[in-house]
């Protein structure tokens, strides 16, 4: 006889601060969830680097984006200058336009990286999240969803349990 796969539901939880998520994740792992069932979303991903689960950045840090854009532009600039020196065209207007185009491309790349969108499933929360909030998404067996929600609320009253809909309780269950 073939066993039916257990259906899982996604539970969304908004956790304030960057210290509490570690404790919540450890409790969920102790409750029987696996590392693959839990994902964290944060604007400050570097503060959660040592988590045992996947951590996804909601937005790239401006300093990191700027560094990547400048590093890429510098590599291309060095390559163009070496090419110009090799062919003896250091002062040509064509090389200057290539250099300016390279810098403009780096700036456009940095700008589009900063505009990285929220994951589609979390867009309803975009206006509600503070800079230090962490969104926890857990894939929970449907039969254990209610008890797990109540357990989280009892352990951590400061946490907002959004249920299976990131906007909160759906209007029609």
Image: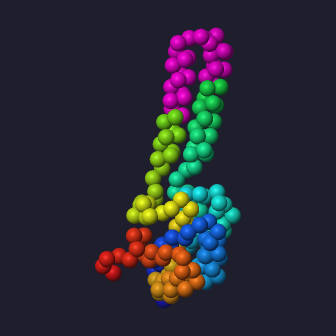
Left or right of residue 167, residue 12 in this image: right
Residue 148 visible in the displayed image: no
Residue 125, by quadrant, is: bottom left
Figure check: 84 above or below 151:
above
Position of 154 with respect to 50 (left or right) is left
Q: What x and y, as percent, mark residue 90?
A: 62, 12
Direction left: furthest residue: 172
Question: How many numbered circles does the render carry?
Answer: 0
Magenta stretch contains residue 84: yes
Residue at 52 percent of width and 82 percent of height: 153
The boundaries of the magenta stretch are: 79-106
Where residue 43 sits in the image (x, y, percent)?
55, 57
Q: Residue furthest right?
A: 50
Give the main secondary structure, helix, strand or loop, of the magenta stretch.
Answer: helix
Q: At x 56% / y 11%, what residue is drawn?
A: 92
- Residue 12 percent coordinates (x, y): 48, 72
Image position of 27 (left or right of 114): right
Question: Is residue 94 inside the magenta stretch?
Answer: yes
Q: Quadrant of the C terminus?
A: bottom left
Q: Residue at x 64, y 62 (%)?
A: 48
Along the viewing direction, whichever of 154 and 75 lies nearer the viewer: 154
């Amino acid at each position: 006889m073939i066993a039916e796969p257990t259906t899982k539901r996604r539970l969304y939880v908004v956790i304030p601060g960057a210290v509490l998520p570690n404790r919540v994740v450890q409790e969920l792992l102790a409750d029987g969830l696996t590392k693959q069932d839990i994902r964290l979303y944060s604007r400050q991903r570097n503060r959660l680097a040592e988590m045992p689960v996947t951590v996804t950045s909601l937005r790239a840090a401006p300093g990191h984006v700027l560094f990547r854009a400048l590093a890429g532009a510098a590599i291309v600039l060095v390559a163009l200058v070496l090419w110009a020196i090799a062919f003896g065209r250091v002062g040509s207007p064509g090389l200057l336009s290539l250099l300016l185009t390279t810098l403009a491309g780096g700036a456009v790349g940095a700008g589009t990286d900063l505009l990285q969108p929220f994951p589609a499933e979390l867009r309803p929360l975009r206006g509600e999240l503070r800079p230090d909030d962490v969104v926890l998404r857990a894939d929970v067996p449907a039969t254990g969803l209610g008890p797990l929600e109540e357990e989280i609320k009892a352990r951590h009253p400061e946490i907002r349990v959004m249920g299976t809909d990131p906007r909160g309780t759906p209007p029609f269950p």
